[in-house]
Amino acid sequence: MRLARSAPIGLMLTVLASPSFAAPAPKDKGEGFATPQACFKAMQAALKQKDYKKFVAGMSTRWQETLARDMLLTAVSIGGKAGFKEEVQKILTRHKITRETQEKIQKLYSEFAPGGRNLEARDQMTRALPKYIKDRPGFVADMYAALMKVIPAAAKPAFDELKNVKITGVRAEATLTTGSGNLTTEQGVTFTKEKDGWRMNAPVPKDKPKK
C-alpha cells in the first residue's frame, strides 16, 4: 500500500496496512462466513461499494481489536486539515471517548514516544486502549470511512484476488493480492474459524509492490 504524503493520512494508512501487537480476541457479535473464500468475496465487494461496516465485519475479532486500538491512538493525536480533524473528533464523540480520555491517552503515550524509550511500557499502555471503545467494529468502520474520504484515489486499497487457500482445522492460509493505484502487492493472509464462521486476519506483505 502506497502512503500518502500528508503526515496524519500516512500514519493512518500505516495503521491500516500493518499487523499490530498480539492480544486476546474480544467478544464480537458480528457474523462470520461459511468459507475463507466467501469472507474474501464479501470484503472485496464491501470495499468496492464503500460499505466499511461490512468490510470490517469480515475481519477477525483480533484484527478488529488491534485496529481499534491503533486508530484510537492515531485519532487522539491527529493533525492535518481542519475538516478532517473535526470529522475524527465527531467520531470520537459518537463513540463516547471524552476529551478527558483523549488527553489522558495523549499524556500517557507522550511519556514513551520520544526516542523510542521504554518500548515495553508503551506497548502495555497501547494494549489497554480497547477498554475505552465499546463498539470496536463500529469505531473502526467509522474511522476507515473518514480516511477513505481524504486520501488520494490512487492510494486507496483494493482486494484483487485470493489464491492458494489451504485449510487446516480452524485456520486457513492463503495469498492475497491487493491493489493501490497501478501497484499490486502479494500478501500472506490467514483466516480463523470463529464461533460464527470464517474471518480474515491482518495480511502481511510478502514482497515489494509491483507495477
Image (tube, rainbow, N blue to C red):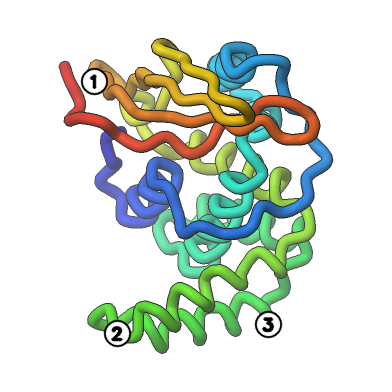
Q: Which residue is more in the foreground, 28 or 159?
A: 28
The answer to whether 90 appears left or right of 154 in the picture is: right
Q: CA distance from mark 2 to mark 1?
A: 35 Å
* Res. 95 image quadrant: bottom right
Residue holding disc 1:
183
Image quarter hosting the N terminus: top left
Task: Name the residue nearer the viewer: 129 or 79.
Answer: 129
At a point 72% along the width and 54% down the height, the residue shown is: 26
Which of the marked residues, 2 or 1, is nearer the chain's N terminus? 2
| Disc number for residue 117 | 2
> Which is in the foreground here, disc 3 or disc 2?
2
The kind of residue on which mark 1 rests is: Leu
- Residue drawn at 43 percent across, 78 percent down: 122
Q: Residues within 10 Å of mark 3 (few under 14, many from 20)?
A: few
Mark 3: which amino acid?
Glu
Q: Kindly report which numbered mark, 3 or 1, lies closer to the viewer in this rendering.
A: 1
Question: What residue is rendered at 34% in x and 85% in y?
Answer: 118
Q: Horizontal and vertical percent for residue 189?
A: 43, 29
